[in-house]
Structures are given as structure tokens and as C-alpha cells.
Amino acid sequence: MSKPTVVVTRQLPPAALNPILERCDARYWDSEEPIERGTLLEWVQGADGLYCLLTDTVDDELLNAAGPGLRVVATMSVGYDHVDVAALRKRGIILGNTPGVLTETTAELAVALLLATARRLPEGTHAVESGTWPIWRPMWMTGRDIHGSTVGIVGLGRIGAAFARMLGGFGCRILYTGPNEKPEAAQAVNATFAPMDALLQESDFVAVHCPLNEQTRALFSTEAFGKMKATAVLINTSRGGVVDQDALYQALVQGEIAAAGLDVTDPEPLPADHPLVSLENCVILPHIGSATVATRTKMAVMTTENLLAGVEGRPLPNQVD
Ligand code: DGY
């Protein structure tokens, strides 16, 4: 029996790659850099499965190029805003992603970013490195306490809930918002539902954990920043598109909010000369929420399992509904 044909768009760790090479005819982009679009459009022709990353746009153009044989798209990410889900559904193509395995790791990074932003850690290390560390002063490099603060979580999904649980140790009051109340998840982490406006008005820290979609695109706008406390800190580890970055820049410069910590931006990479990069009260990380060896390996392997299940006609371990 002939092997299924699959396209793999990036270099993978052996644990994820080897099963694909054994069981499929693989068109493998063996590089740390993204596959060029033109090459991808050629390679998908006649493929049964596609292993992609969040840097690959999966849209009508690509699916048309693939043709009717494509059965499964497996993305090595939990987020799938780079995939046109309706276009897949129209063609009966299934989509697999990687929820669960990155939850704790990403929540840890969100806590780290919250601490780094609130306590001004990058500014502190910069002062040491640049020789501008002055003699001890009462109010130098003073930041904000996490303990006793109100933290507003936008999106109490897996990662938002893990983040809330981790903050339990700081004795924070936790609010959450989202399209639906989630009484069970909320009770488990001692969180209270609040409408978006109330959450913005009451929170000392606002943490974004919702997916990017048409409802959440540019959710953090001039209007939203106007509702936040002047002392508030925004933390975003979901997708850059949830925040209107021009509005964020203005809010930070004009003191409408105190600081922001971003692990995600739009675009990525964010150019080093972007106005947000110049701000001391904006801490920017290069989308490393899930970046531990163990978690990235699990994500890569889970994506392989989704891909192989799809091309071999078995249910996917993690299928997007
Ligand atoms: C995801 O999986 O969607 C993250 O953004 C990368 O880990």
C-alpha cells in the first residue's frame, strides 16, 4: 500500500519527525526559517496531510493548491487564527492543534512577564549593565505589588485558569471575563465573573488569555485603555492582534495606563525601531510563552500524532471542533 503524502513546513525534533518519515512520503522543509509561500503552494499539491506552524497561513489559496486529497491540517500550536477554519470545514478537512500540553508553561511565562513588568526587571538589569545603577535611593526603581492586587483575566480558558491558580499564592483578587460565565472553572481558582467594563475599571493588572478572532481583534482599543486605571498594567500572552498597538502606545505615553508586558505583537518579529520598543514601561518578549524544551517537544510530537491519525483515517488525539 502506498504511503500518504504529507508536507512538513519546518525543521522538527527527531521525536516528532521520525514517525512521519517512517510512515509517510514527506516533503520536509528542513530549516529553522519558514518555507517560502510559493514553495509551499507547490509542495501541497496532491498532499494528504499538512503539518504547519502558526507562521503558515492556511487559506483558500493554499487549500485550492492542495486539491481534493488533503484530509488533515495539523498545526503545532494551540492557537489557530492563522487557519481559515471555515475554508477547511467547507472541504471536509480536519484540523488538529495542541491544547493542554502548553498550558502550565504558558501560564508560568505570563506570571513571569507580570512580575517583570510590575517590578521593572528589564529596567533594573539595564541599569546594572549600563553602569547607571545609582547608590540606594528610597524611591528609585519602585514598581507595583502583585500581592493584594486585583487581577482581571480576559478569557478563563485552560491557560487563563492556570494563570489564576498560580496567582492564588500571591493572594490576589481574581476577576475574569469572556463571552460566557464559567462557574466551575472560576470556582476552582477563586475567580469572580465581571463584565468587561467592570473588569477594566477595577483591575490593577489585566491579563489577556483569549484567542484572536473577529470578536477579540483590537479588543484593547483607545476606548478600553480609557476605562483602565492610570496605575494598571496590561499583560498579553495570547495574540498581538487582540491589542491595538497604536492605541497602546498612546495610552502608555499619555499615562492612561502605567505599563504593558507583551509576549505577542503584530507583526512578529516586531521591528526593533517600533515605537513600543522605545518605551521603558513596555516589556516585550519574543513570543516565548510555550518555549521550554519539554513543552515544545510535546507540542511537536502531538502535532505528528494528529497528522498521522488524520492521514491514516483514525480520530485525531486533538481535533478542533
Ligand atoms: C500557541 O500554541 O498558539 C502559542 O502561541 C505558541 O505556543
Image: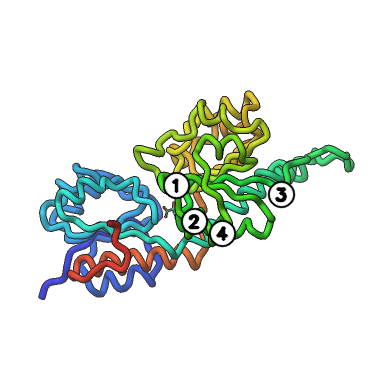
Query: Quick one: label 1 or label 2, which is nearer the N terminus?
Result: 2
**In this view, 314 is above or below 129:** below
Q: CA distance from mark 1 to mark 2?
A: 9 Å
Q: CA distance from mark 2 to mark 4?
A: 12 Å
Q: Nearer the viewer, mark 2 or mark 4?
A: 4
Asked if labels 3 and 4 touch by Cβ distance under 8 angstroms, the answer is no
Q: CA distance from mark 2 to mark 3?
A: 22 Å
Q: Residue 38 versus residue 191: which sits nearer the camera? A: 191
**In this view, 134 is above or below 146:** above
Query: Quick one: label 2 or label 3, which is nearer the N terminus?
Result: 3
> How dense is the environment of label 3, judged by Cα within 10 Å: few (below 14), some, or many (20 and up)?
few
Residue at position x 51%, y 56% in the image:
186
Amino acid type, residue under disc 4 in the picture: Val
Q: Which residue is mark 4?
A: 189
- Rendering coords of residue 99 (x, y %): 40, 61
Residue at position x 34%, y 38% in the image:
214
Helix, strand or loop status at disc 4: loop
> Which of the 4 image quarters holds residue 168?
bottom right
- Rendering coords of residue 35 (x, y %): 31, 50
Residue at position x 26%, y 45% in the image:
84
Query: Quick one: label 3 or label 1, which is nearer the N terminus?
Result: 3
> How dense is the environment of label 4, judged by Cα within 10 Å: few (below 14), some, or many (20 and up)?
some
Asked if labels 4 and 1 touch by Cβ distance under 8 angstroms, the answer is no
Q: Residue 208 versus residue 277: which sits nearer the camera? A: 208
Helix, strand or loop status at disc 1: loop
Q: Which residue is mark 1?
A: 210
Q: Which residue is mark 3?
A: 148
- Rendering coords of residue 79 (x, y %): 38, 51
Q: Is residue 147 left or right of residue 214?
A: right
Query: Quick one: label 4 or label 3, which is nearer the N terminus?
Result: 3
Quarter of the image that includes the C terminus: bottom left
